[in-house]
Image (cartoon, rainbow, N blue to C red):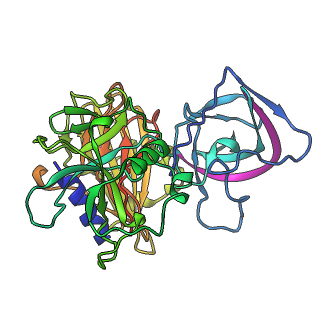
């Protein structure tokens, strides 16, 4: 099913790092601070500024506590419930009340935030609130076919693992930038291979696991048995002289590979599910109901009157096993589409929600309402002992597509696609 990667590239032409922090009620002690204190947990887990009351648009942030973010009736008060991991929340108050959290050997300091919850305001600690959702640090790659010699023959199956090392690692700064190469496809030498694998945290015990998601077929190959290949990127100069930055670094699958695999990952043991329960998704128009309006305003209280703002708003649903997935597609005054997705189980429980917004580098893929065979959207169980995922809601011209879990207890995944330009 290599059309996955082709579909992604097509939509891209047309059109962040996981932070697994959690609030552990059995180990966290919240203390009131008597004076203003400096925030210590900066990066992606603090909000960018105090709330400006003159702003007309809602201030939307995201809960980043892995096990759920406790909200309280008042600062230091009684816990009323939890916001899901990556749940979009509306900040309505930036208090001057400070806290100190002792979480094992780490100290978090900051202020309490007031969050809109239906008609009420509840309070959370800002150490677990971010400007953007957090994503898994798990790396999932595409399996692609490469025609190394441009002759439309002898295609080779490869997994581009260029993003395995951290780009801030010493490996990249130590590369011989002056060295040039004339070939477009070749095997890296031992020195490069050893340095690359070390920088990527890939050991001699790791294997490359590849899966065909429509059937659940999985194959595993020891890293030591695979060639580490240099393949010139399509955006590289055509002069015939290339440097190390012009190449993708790929693992070449054995010649006898005869199955169109889709996704790959690096690990000692195979994490992929073999009973994938793969399903293409077809979406159906859905009439607004009071119960669905309640679900949406419960999860996205700032939506207000978007439901009845036709023709700017369209509501769709699809199903996967015991999940119903709703999508509220809304076009704002700037003619940009925002997609609000809610996942609901048969018992009415909301198990996840997320937002996709059209922008300079993000395009929302139209929901498939026709034939299943033409659908670019599907759901499946990709990993063992984990909830199902949905794929194909958006495309990225400067980034990589996302896999969304249908349950909120796992951070969503940004595919490692090496989408360089």
The single residue placed furthest to the bottom in the displayed view is: 239
Residue 338 located left or right of residue 390? right
Dominant secondary structure, magenta: strand
State the residue in front, 155 or 240.
Answer: 240
The single residue placed furthest to the right in the displayed view is: 34
Q: Residue at x 25, y 61 (%)?
A: 185
Give residue 344's quadrant in the image. top left
Is residue 230 a member of the stretch shown in magenta? no
Is residue 97 a member of the stretch shown in magenta? yes
Residue 258 visible in image: yes
The single residue placed furthest to the top in the displayed view is: 26
State the residue in front, 308 or 96.
Answer: 96
- Span of residues in magenta: 88-103
Residue 215 located left or right of residue 63? left
Q: Residue at x 34, y 72 (%)?
A: 236
Q: Residue 246's spot in the image, x, y percent?
A: 37, 67
Q: Residue at x 28, y 71 (%)?
A: 14
Q: Residue 417's spot in the image, x, y percent?
A: 35, 55
State the residue in front, 335 or 100.
Answer: 100
Give residue 100's quadrant in the image. top right
Residue 67 located left or right of residue 51? left
Q: Residue 248's spot in the image, x, y percent?
A: 34, 59
Q: Residue 218's spot in the image, x, y percent?
A: 21, 32
């Amino acid at each position: 099913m290599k059309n996955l990667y082709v579909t992604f590239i097509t939509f891209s032409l047309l059109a962040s790092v996981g932070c697994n922090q959690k609030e552990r009620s059995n180990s966290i002690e919240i203390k009131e601070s008597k004076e203003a204190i400096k925030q210590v947990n900066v990066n992606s887990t603090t909000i960018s500024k105090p709330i400006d009351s003159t702003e007309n648009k809602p201030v939307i942030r995201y809960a980043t506590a892995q096990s759920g973010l406790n909200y309280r009736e008042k600062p230091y008060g009684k816990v009323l419930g939890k916001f899901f991991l990556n749940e979009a929340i509306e900040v309505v108050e930036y208090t001057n009340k400070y806290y100190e959290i002792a979480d094992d050997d780490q100290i978090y300091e900051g202020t309490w935030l007031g969050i809109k919850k239906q008609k009420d305001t509840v309070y959370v600690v800002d150490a677990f609130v971010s400007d953007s959702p957090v994503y898994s640090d798990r790396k999932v790659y595409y399996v692609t076919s490469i025609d190394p010699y441009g002759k439309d023959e002898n295609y080779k199956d490869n997994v581009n693992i260029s993003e395995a090392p951290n780009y801030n690692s010493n490996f990249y700064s130590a590369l011989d930038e002056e060295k040039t190469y004339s070939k477009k496809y070749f095997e890296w030498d031992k020195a490069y291979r050893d340095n690359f694998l070390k920088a990527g945290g890939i050991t001699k015990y790791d294997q490359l696991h590849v899966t065909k998601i429509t059937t659940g077929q999985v194959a595993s190959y020891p890293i030591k048995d695979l060639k580490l290949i240099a393949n010139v990127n399509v955006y590289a100069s055509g002069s015939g002289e290339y440097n190390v930055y012009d190449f993708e670094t790929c693992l070449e699958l054995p010649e006898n590979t005869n199955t169109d695999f889709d996704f790959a990952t690096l690990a000692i043991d195979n994490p992929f599910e073999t009973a994938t329960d793969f399903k293409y998704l077809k979406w159906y128009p859905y009439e607004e109901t009071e119960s669905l309006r309640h679900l949406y305003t419960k999860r996205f209280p700032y939506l207000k009157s978007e439901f009845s703002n036709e023709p700017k708003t369209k509501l769709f649903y699809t199903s996967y096993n015991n999940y119903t997935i709703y999508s509220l597609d809304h076009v704002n005054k700037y003619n940009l589409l925002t997609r609000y997705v809610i996942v609901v189980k048969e018992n009415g429980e909301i198990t996840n929600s997320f937002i996709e917004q059209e922008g300079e580098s993000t395009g929302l893929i139209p929901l498939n309402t026709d034939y299943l065979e033409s659908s670019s959207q599907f759901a499946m169980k990709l990993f063992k002992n984990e909830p199902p995922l949905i794929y194909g809601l958006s495309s990225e011209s400067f980034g990589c597509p996302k896999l969304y879990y249908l349950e909120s207890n796992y951070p969503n995944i940004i595919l490692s696609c090496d989408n360089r330009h």
